[in-house]
Image (spheres, helix red, strand yellow):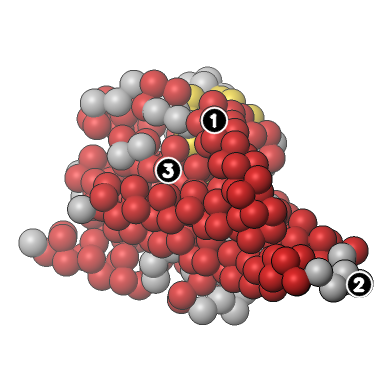
Amino acid sequence: MNSLKTTLLLGGLTGLLLVAGQAMGGEQGMIIALVFAVAMNFGSYWFSDKIVLRLYRAREVDRSSAPVLYPVVQELASRAGLPMPKVYVVENEAPNAFATGRNPDNAAVAATTGLLRIMDREELAGVMAHELAHVQHRDTLISAVAATIAGAIAMLANMAQWAMIFGMGRNDDNRSGGAIGALLMMFLAPLAASLIQMAVSRSREYEADARGAAVCGNPLWLARALRKLASANARIPDRAAEQNPATAHMFIVNPLSGRDIGRLFSTHPPVEERVRRLESAARG
């Protein structure tokens, strides 16, 4: 069911991109938007992992340079039946973690120095098991494609805004109709794209929590880690994520959650609900 939902959501994003192109340039604009969508999907498939790791200046580590993190990931990957991913550390006091890569054979997991500082080994195992669950479910590719197309729609809307500014003096009826369509897309397309992108992310977090709990062997390890992350995230701003808000959905907890964001616009389900489900699984 989640796979079907994700497929529909990604289809909706691509459809929005086509509608945005059609509103701005008619049939020719829609064709350009289709080419743009294909290019965006191709780029996000092959290069999204490298882009995000470079954005956060992640440093690849091995057993000698990360004597706690690396063995934990190695053991969990073996339990999950996954190839060993590349392991990275991000110099960032805000505790968090993410996974990226187009498939399990080309995956990477990353943890911030803030996360490594506050987690004990069990909690670290819970966090990294959650990230490996995203790799196993191929959520990393899905989220990258969704973010890329959503960003493309926002860019087209920005282009529509400038087109409106420079074309305001024209009285042609067809151009007026196109201007109205462009005006609607300028406001509605980015909003709809963001909502769909966030729904993709939210629909996957519960599933990754459940699988991660099974891989690490104890749902309470992840539950404890989530409580720590939520508390620390509210106190320690993540400056890097604030500069790259389109990547917020990739992290185990929303790095922007310290801001006043309504639940509808959150890239993650509420931490308290995730913890409740994990504690219920532990009792069961």
Q: Which dot marks residue 51?
A: none
Q: Is residue 87 above or below residue 130?
A: above
Q: Nearer the viewer, residue 148 or 235?
A: 148
For label 2, the residue is: 169
Q: Residue furthest left?
A: 284
Q: Amino acid at mark 2?
A: Gly
For label 3, the residue is: 142
Residue 141 makes an appearance in the image: yes
Q: Where's residue 146, x and y in %?
A: 49, 48
Q: Nearer the viewer, residue 210 or 96?
A: 210
Q: Amino acid at mark 3?
A: Ile
Q: CA distance from mark 3 to mark 2?
A: 42 Å
Q: Where's residue 24, x and y in %?
A: 69, 58
Residue located 87% across and 69% down the image: 170
Residue located 45% across and 30% down the image: 102
Mark 3 Cα shell of 10 Å, populated few (<14), some (14-19), many (≥20): many
Q: In the structure shown, which secondary structural element does the residue marked by tag 2 occupy?
A: loop
For label 1, the residue is: 42
Quadrant of the snapshot with the C terminus: bottom left
Query: Sequence-wise, which precedes: disc 1 or disc 2?
Result: 1
Q: Is residue 272 left or right of residue 64?
A: left
Q: In the structure shown, which secondary structural element does the residue marked by tag 1 occupy?
A: helix
